[in-house]
Image: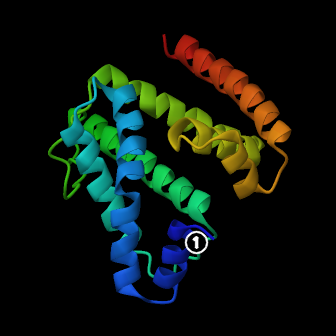
Amino acid sequence: MNTVTRLLIRWRQGDTAGRDELFQAVQHELHRIAYRYMQRERDGHLLQATALVNEAYLRLIDQPEANWQNRAHFFAISAHLMRQILVDHARGSAAHKRGGALLHLPLDEGLHLAPEKSKELLALDEALTALALVDRRKADVVELRYFGGLEVEEVAELLKVHPNTVIRDWRLAKAWLKRKIDTADRTAS
C-alpha cells in the first residue's frame, strides 16, 4: 500500500493529522493537475493554479465522510472538484455579464478566465455532462485522463476495467465530444 493510500485511510478514520500529512504529500500532484486546467484556460500562472488547489482543498476537507478507495480515486475526485470550481466560476462570470450576481469563491483572486476560454470550458462541460447521460464510464475516462492527468493503467484500476477498454473509451469519447461541441457551435451561430 502506498503512502497516499495509507494517509487516506487514516483520514477516513478521523485522523486530522493524517489528512494534513496527506495534503503535504499530494500538494505537488494537485498543483500539476491545477496547472493543466489553467493552461487550458489561459496562459497558466502559478498563482492561478495555487488558488485552484486551495479552493479544491477547502472542498475536499469539507467531506469528512469521504470513502477514498485509493490514490487514483482521491486524484479523480480532486480533478473533478477543480473542474467544477472553474465551471462554477465561468457560469458566475457569464451571469454577471447578464446582470446577475457573481459567484463567490473564497480564494478566486487568481481565477480570471478569458471570456473565450470560459465559453470553451462551458461547452466542454455541457458536452461531458451529456456524454455522462449516454455513457457514464466514457465520461469518467475523459474526466480522469484529460482533467485528472491519470495514466491509462490508473484509470483502468479505478474503474475496474481492462486498460484496453480505457483506451477504446477514450478514443470514442473524444470523437463523441468533438461532434457534440461542433454541433452546438453550429446551432449557436
> Residue at 39% of width from left, 42% of height from top?
32
Residue furthest to the bottom in view is: 14
Q: As drawn, is 6 to the left or to the right of 31?
A: right
x%, y% of residue 20? 33, 75
The residue labelled by disc 1 is 68
Residue furthest to the front in view is: 2
Amino acid type at circle 1 is: Trp
Where is residue 141, by image quadrant?
Answer: top right
Disc 1 is placed on an element classified as: loop
> Residue at 56% of width from left, 54% of height from top?
76
x%, y% of residue 25? 39, 63
Where is residue 90, by image quadrant?
Answer: top left
Q: As drawn, is 157 to the left or to the right of 130?
A: right
Q: Is residue 137 above or below residue 6?
A: above
- Location of the N terminus by quadrant is bottom right
Q: As drawn, is 186 to the left or to the right of 97?
A: right
Q: Is residue 131 above or below residue 159?
A: above
x%, y% of residue 40? 39, 27
> Residue at 23% of width from left, 55% of height from top?
105
Is residue 86 at all visible to an observer of this figure? Answer: yes
Figure disc tally: 1
Q: Nearer the viewer, residue 157 or 144?
A: 157
> Residue at 50% of width from left, 16% of height from top?
188
Q: Residues within 10 Å of mark 1 (few under 14, many from 20)?
A: some
x%, y% of residue 180? 65, 23
